[in-house]
Image: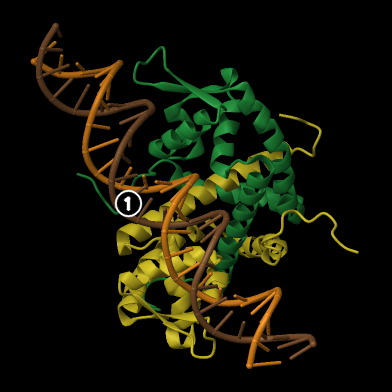
Chain colours: A yellow, B green, C brown, D orange
Amino acid sequence: MPEDVAWLTDDEQRAWRAFLEATQLLFHRLDRELQQDAGLSQAEYEILVRLSEMPGLSLRMGELANQTLFSRSRLSHAVARLEAAGWVRRHSCVTDGRGTEAVLLDKGKALLDKAARAHVAAVRRYFFDQLSKSDVARIERIADAVREPLRDDSGAGRVVCEDV
Amino acid sequence: MPEDVAWLTDDEQRAWRAFLEATQLLFHRLDRELQQDAGLSQAEYEILVRLSEMPGLSLRMGELANQTLFSRSRLSHAVARLEAAGWVRRHSCVTDGRGTEAVLLDKGKALLDKAARAHVAAVRRYFFDQLSKSDVARIERIADAVREPLRDDSGAGRVVCEDV
DNA sequence: CCGTAACAGTTGAACTTTCAACAATCCTGC
DNA sequence: GCAGGATTGTTGAAAGTTCAACTGTTACGG
């Protein structure tokens, strides 16, 4: 391991590895339970949730992609599967001929309700049960700080200096 | 959304979503930069790192799977690719005829050194630069608390009560 | 020893995600 | 209005992951 770039301190090293392992384990576990309880992947669940929160239970594909942080392609494939399963329907957008709207169907809403119960319980059990009130606040603050710089320039490769 | 199971409070809801989004954005970004800088996926990088930390630069497949949290199958495929690329070699274990040892080759070590420089810089830029000293300590503590219950019974489906 | 169970790892098929190319529509300036 | 460019979304193939079945090896009980 080279030493000439700013390496991580021991504290940082331990924190980073613990963080990686914890998130990995947590997401794997939540995924598996969601799969067992409702036959949904985290990705599918996320899509259904976002739709369910919209008035009209519908959303343009692009906006849905933004909210879920999926690529357009990934979302297209995923929604195609949800549509095949009868949980979602797509129809082309009235106001913009290029667009497509995805709509959550009753069958999908029912499944989501069932899935959400189990999923929230799991999130509580494996995550919030281990956390104090101040941990929760701290996590929100840290997460906000981390995501803010990453949020916008999501397609940029390490901008160094690029103007005039 | 049903209300009869312990739902999340508003604080928890916000923290959870921020956490999900931050981790997603962070991992995507690190993945992409690793890919651009060294042509490695996070998974491949992880494998090379673990091998590089062993005396002899080698590890049994099973132990490597444990450390990386990969399934045996995933690891098999991944190491097969690394082997095809000439970064790793496999040979069957001397002391246990069933086993296989993966060994990091010079070419792999060299690649890893290069990759590590860029990767660590990225981890610092996108993660630690946003964190205070006390954030780092808190993260380690929380991560430990979260992973500990998940660590062992990694194959269990929500044990309710199972004895006598 | 021998038969059986447990273990270590690999394999191929099914599925998901990514990547690049594409079709269709909208917008803009002339 | 219409050419050129940007935007929206889909598609098919390649790459990666998961799942279940399989091979070969070791450990154990009789």
Q: Residue at x 69, y 43 (%)?
A: B37
Q: In this view, does C4 lie to the left or right of A157?
A: left
Residue B2 appears in which quarter of the rendering? bottom left
Q: In this view, does B70 lie above or below A33?
A: above
Q: Nearer the viewer, residue B107 or A30?
A: B107
Q: Which class describes the residues within 10 Å of circle 1: few (<14), some (14-19), or many (20+)?
A: few
Q: In this view, does B156 lie to the left or right of D6?
A: left
Viewer-closest of B139 and B18: B18
Question: What kind of residue is marked 1?
Answer: Gly
Pointer 1 residue: B157
Counting from the top left corner in percent of width and height, residue A160 is at 82, 54
The image quadrant that residue D2 belongs to is bottom right
Q: In which quarter of the image is residue B86?
A: top right
Residue at figure coordinates x 71%, y 29% from the top left: A1
Q: How many labels were placed on the picture? A: 1
x 40%, y 12%: residue: B95
In the figure, is residue A129 to the left or right of D22? right
| Residue A7 x, y percent position in the rendering | 76, 37
Q: Kindly tell me whether residue A98 is visible in this rendering.
A: yes
Residue A75 image offset from top left, x and y in percent: 48, 67
Q: Quadrant of the C terminus of chain A?
A: bottom right
The reply to whether residue B144 is visible in this rendering is no
Q: Is residue A17 above or below residue B52?
A: below
